[in-house]
Amino acid sequence: MNIGFIGLGNMGGPMAANLAKAGHNVTGFDMADVSIEGVEMAASAAEAVTDQDVVITMLPNGAILRSVAAEIIPAMKRGAVFIDCSTVDVDSARAVAADAEAASLLPVDAPVSGGVGGAQAGTLTFMAGGSDAGFKKAEPLFEVMGQKAVHCGGPGAGQSAKICNNMILGATMIATCEAFALADKLGLDRQKMFDVVSTSSGYSWSMNAYCPAPGVGPQSPADNDYKPGFAAELMLKDLRLSQQAAVSADADTPMGALAETLYARFVEEEGGKGRDFSAMLPRFEKRGRG
């Protein structure tokens, strides 16, 4: 396919490179001066999307997505697929999808899970929203960039799935870190706690696959001084999106709201910015009941 790719940062760059390696013709654009192997760089976003079969965006937030979409939608050919892989608010995803549909495009909102490592290895999971026709055309590209793609429903459904998933992740990571800190103060060996919890009702991805305690369980950022696989500030972004959606949908999400508050304090007041989101464990280690 002929593909335009807008946003070639830590995630978008390797995703575009994997598409080029698979034999697709990829034209890219980024505000930064970047060079991606196999990707021809354009002088503007509009130039990158002209006459392309598929356009993919990977952008920081909903406001930027809306701005870029306003620039590129008029330049895209009718019938092209517009895949947005950014993680943004549901309202922005739906607004951009409506504009794309009005221009006879096939919009797909497809945020990803798997982080930079997954982008590099081509093992991302895509949560997609949009029409059946749009998803069908996008699916072969998801197979190149990832290991799984789930069609979650209509426009905005991919973003909805992503923020619900990450609200669970943020809350369970906090609970896991709290439990390790409590175990320490009760004199319980961390490995023994892991051996019990990882095979009983406390089982979770945060415990079993991404354990926040160094030297316990599979290799994780905790074993690398909490250098981020998924940065705490990105978790905070997703939790804020979850609470924005909760307000819009009139949903009661007290655990999600508390997780947002704790990550905001960690990132903005306690030096958590630039650390992995599992670095909540050393935060709790230092704190007492008060």
Image: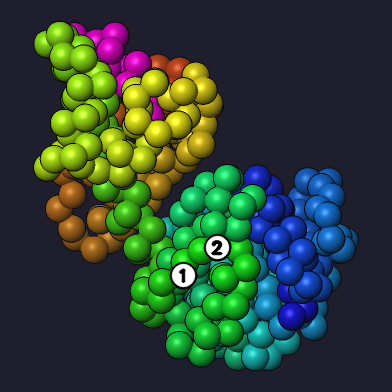
Q: Which secondary structure, mark 1?
A: strand
| Disc 2 to disc 1, C-alpha distance | 8 Å
Residue identifier under label 1: 149
Q: As drawn, is 35 to the left or to the right of 158?
A: right
Q: Between residue 60 and residue 21, name the one nearer to us.
A: 21
Residue 189 found in image quarter: top left
Tag 1: amino acid: Ala
Q: Are marks 2 and 1 in contact (CB under 8 Å)?
A: yes
Mark 2: few/some/many CA within 10 Å (<14, 14-19, 20+): many
Q: Residue at horizontal 84%, vertical 61%?
A: 38
Tag 2: amino acid: Gly
Q: As drawn, is 218 to the left or to the right of 23?
A: left
Q: Quadrant location of the C terminus?
A: top left
Q: Between residue 103 and residue 163, name the one nearer to us.
A: 163
Q: Which secondary structure, mark 2?
A: strand
Residue 282, visible in the rendered structure: yes
Is residue 288 highlighted in magenta? yes
Q: Position of residue 128 (x, y in %)?
A: 45, 71
Q: Residue at horizontal 31%, vertical 44%?
A: 205
Q: Position of residue 31 (x, y in %)?
A: 76, 50
Q: Residue at horizontal 83%, vertical 55%?
A: 37
- How many dots with numbers? 2
Mark 1: few/some/many CA within 10 Å (<14, 14-19, 20+): many
Q: Quadrant location of the N terminus?
A: bottom right
Residue identifier under label 2: 146
Q: Between residue 67 and residue 194, name the one nearer to us.
A: 194
Please give the range of residues in magenta. 278-290
